[in-house]
Image: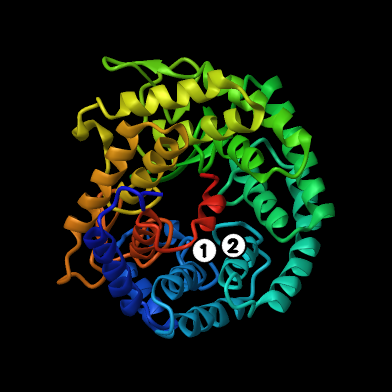
Amino acid sequence: MLSKVISSTLRERCVAIAKFIGEQLRSPRDVLSFFDRARQQVSLYDDLQWSPIAMSNGCTGVAILHSALDEALPNEGWSHRAHDQLAAAVSTRTSDISLFSGWSGFAVAAAYCSRQHQNYRVLVDQVSQLLTRYAASWLTVAGQAPLNSRYFDLIAGAAGHYLALGACDLGEPASAELEYLSAVVDRLERNGWRSLTDYYGASGPVEISATNLGISHGISGIGSALAVSRRSEREGDVAERIGDVLLKSTVKTLWGRQWPAMIVEGEDATPGRMAWCYGTPGTAIALWNIGVRTKRDDFKSLALETMKIALQVPRASWLVSDFGVCHGLAGLALLFMLIGSESACEELVAAAHNMTVELVDAFREDMPLGYRSDYNGEQFDGPGLLDGAAGVGLSLLTLSGACDSAWLRWFAMC
């Protein structure tokens, strides 16, 4: 992390901001009240998939923030608040096993909250049994479905399930998911790496056919999830095939090579936004992780090169619209920090430090959560972990070295 280069004053400020956010979201009732507020602020509210069990936008994600605060500020009652958030989430009646909005996310969050006090091991075991049962039926449906990214991506599909099943040490269902992901990669290769993708534009969702490179919904997510899992040699073999595609999928810009979000046949590919979800930084961390796993220096070299090039691109072209993890400044700071630290690149580490300072300076105590989120140009007070204030607070704790960074695994970052 940045703990070796960050000042004590900046670290204290990061923790104080995270505490402010945590206090504003102290109870499940507070979290849900912000969801209700967002309903009034965002016209396409349902697209954000708010739910108590959601790790992305629900009580489960806030529980992770509270658990991290318990590590940074012990004996202040944050573990009890994390418990209350998990209790609200577990009451949700759903068969959704996705990582970001279902039981997979709840399982890894409960495991994260157990790392210091071992309070939730029985609960994790119970949820693991539920995941095992639901995963089998889900794979039956997915195996017969069209080649759509929603079935294999990190957010809602098998790449996310696989990370969670591995974290819960569920060998048999994890092996079935790996078989499915391997078959998906075979199908993608035969189809020129194109799949159907639900693209969310200003007017709502549209299904398109494209080579989806994103880490959130595309092949980078499969490759990075397999690379960081480290459960079998086959993971590396499948991930390497995706790495070879990413190696050839950059586009030339005035500053050098960058990645587009998608490649649509017959259309000119252009660089995507600078973000975790899509664009160069998220794709670069995926290729970096695949390179580490497969010992491919050419993968790591291109990932590092593109991140350095990203710093030369004018900031206005980054299209950073808010401060969250998904497509905001917090996610970028984490990505520059990770690749910078692992490659010992002072330029990237300095960039991550500067972004951390920028996050701290952007905090507004007169705002309900200190920061506002953006969805298709609409500003709202988002409490979520993926694109809201909880994610900013957790990122600040992580960047300053004040909490366990294990949660980054579920974003396929490391």
Task: Specify the quadrant of the image occupied by residue 28.
Answer: bottom left
Q: Which mark is residue 105?
A: 2
Task: Specify the quadrant of the image occupied by residue 312.
Answer: top left
The C terminus lies in quadrant: top right
User: Please, what is the three-letter code of the amino acid marked with disc 2?
Assistant: Gly
Q: Which mark is residue 221?
A: none
User: Measured from the top left, where is residue 256 in percent x and y?
Assistant: 33, 16
Mark 2 is surrounded, within 10 Å at the Cα level, by few (under 14), some (14 to 19) or many (20 or more) other residues, namely many
* In-image side of 104 versus 312 (left or right): right
Residue ID at (65%, 51%): 163
- Give the number of callouts: 2
Cα distance, mark 2 to mark 1?
A: 5 Å
User: Measured from the top left, where is residue 21 in percent x and y?
Assistant: 31, 71
Q: Nearer the viewer, residue 25 or 1?
A: 1
User: Measured from the top left, where is residue 103 in percent x and y?
Assistant: 64, 65
- Element marked by disc 2: helix
Indicate whether 258 appears above or below 19.
above
User: Please, what is the three-letter code of the amino acid marked with disc 1?
Assistant: Met
* In-image side of 312 versus 161 (left or right): left
Indicate whether 412 appears above or below 164.
above
**Res 191 seen here:** yes
Cβ–Cβ under 8 Å for marks 2 and 1: yes
Q: Nearer the viewer, residue 152 or 175?
A: 175
* In-image side of 353 versus 50 (left or right): left
Residue ID at (76%, 57%): 135
User: Measured from the top left, where is residue 124 in percent x and y?
Assistant: 69, 71
Q: Which mark is residue 55?
A: 1
Task: Specify the quadrant of the image occupied by residue 366.
Answer: bottom left
* In-image side of 365 versus 196 (left or right): left
Residue ID at (47%, 15%): 266
**Mark 2 / mark 1, whichever is N-terminal:** 1
**Res 327 seen here:** no
